[in-house]
Image (cartoon, rainbow, N blue to C red):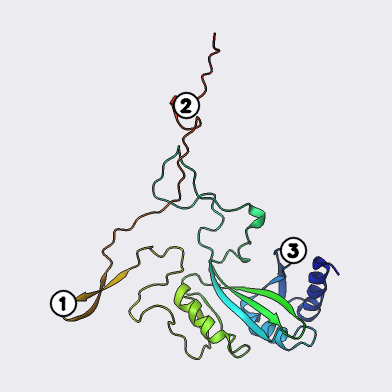
């Protein structure tokens, strides 16, 4: 069986168990991805784990996603040269994964593995509220989600309803904000230094001046340098 045929066979098994509960999401030819509505997340995950034809017993990874400024032709900047440089662009549209249904800013992606059938599947759920992104915790379905969800909370600010111990796992206790959000400043919000007078480490507002970083490539050829342009007048 070809790789495409194998994926379609797995898709038929998923559709037979979860028809109406999940929607097929675009993916690479050798991958299978689905999107689930937030209110159906726990029921769908439980079926993916327990159905004999599926048996996705293992959550390999869980990641938050921020779709802010998604699919913009050029990266958002405050100022940039209009000639002489190339600007950062997204890959071809067909290679860019689509944003979740409904245009949500935040989503959570689950990478699942069936040890029984040696199959893989990606599941994605959107966070309906951008200001307060929340989805149900799947720790009762896969215990490995515990630290994965804490990481997504720490880095993206996504809340997981029902998590037994939702607190930061990578950043410091006094950290402000969520560093993987697309609008998080590159220099951060606070900095740490040792104060010799107080004889202890203190937190203070960041003193680094924010900068906008745009990848640029200087091209010294006749497209940008007037002195190198071809002379339109015929030579005698």
The disc, 3 or 1, on the residue closer to the chain's N-terminal end is 3
The location of residue 19, given as percent across then percent down, is 77, 76
Left or right: residue 235 compared with residue 2 = left
Q: Say which residue label 2 marks.
A: 228
Q: Which of marks 1 and 2 is nearer the N terminus?
A: 1
At a point 63% along the width and 62% down the height, the residue shown is: 97
Residue 36 visible from this viewpoint:
no
Examine the rendered structure and indicate whether residue 79 appears above or below residue 228: below
Mark 2, other Cα within 10 Å: few <14 / some 14–19 / many ≥20: few
Q: 7 or 167: which is nearer to us?
A: 7
Instruction: Give the residue at the far top of this rendering.
Output: 236
Return the disc, 3 or 2, that comes first in the chain's sequence: 3
Q: Which residue is drawn at 46% across and 35% down?
A: 220
- Between marks 3 and 2 in the image, the one whose residue lies nearer the viewer: 2
- Label 1's element? loop
Residue 146 numbered mark, or none: none
Instruction: Please name the residue shown 74% across and 66% down the image.
Output: 30
Which residue bears the numbered disc 3? 29
- Mark 3 vs mark 2, CA separation in Å: 46 Å
Asked if the residue under mark 1 is in contact with the one under mark 3, i.e. CB atoms within 8 Å, the reply is no
Question: Nearer the viewer's eye, disc 3 or disc 1?
Answer: 1
Per the image, the residue denoted by label 1 is 196
Q: In which quarter of the image is residue 138?
A: bottom right
Judge whether 49 appears above or below 100 on screen. Answer: below
């Amino acid at each position: 069986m070809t790789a495409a045929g194998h994926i379609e066979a797995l898709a038929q098994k998923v559709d037979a168990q979860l028809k109406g509960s999940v929607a097929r999401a675009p993916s690479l030819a050798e991958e299978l991805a689905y999107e689930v509505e937030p209110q159906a997340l726990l029921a769908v995950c439980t079926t993916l784990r327990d159905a004999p034809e599926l048996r996705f017993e293992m959550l390999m990874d869980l990641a938050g996603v921020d779709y802010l400024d998604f699919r913009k032709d050029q990266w958002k900047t405050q100022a940039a040269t209009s000639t002489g440089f190339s600007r950062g662009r997204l890959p071809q549209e067909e290679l860019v994964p689509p944003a979740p249904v409904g245009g949500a800013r935040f989503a959570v992606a689950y990478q699942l593995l069936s040890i029984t059938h040696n199959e893989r599947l990606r599941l994605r759920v959107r966070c309906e509220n951008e200001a307060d992104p929340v989805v149900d915790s799947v720790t009762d379905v896969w215990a490995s989600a515990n630290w994965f969800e804490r990481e997504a909370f720490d880095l993206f600010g996504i809340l997981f309803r029902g998590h037994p111990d939702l607190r930061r796992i990578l950043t410091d206790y006094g950290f402000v904000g969520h560093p993987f959000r697309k609008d998080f400043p590159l220099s951060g919000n606070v900095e740490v230094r040792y104060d010799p007078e107080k004889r202890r480490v203190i937190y203070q507002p960041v003193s680094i001046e924010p900068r906008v970083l745009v990848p640029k490539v200087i091209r010294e050829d006749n497209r940008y340098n007037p002195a190198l342009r071809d002379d339109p007048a015929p030579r005698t």
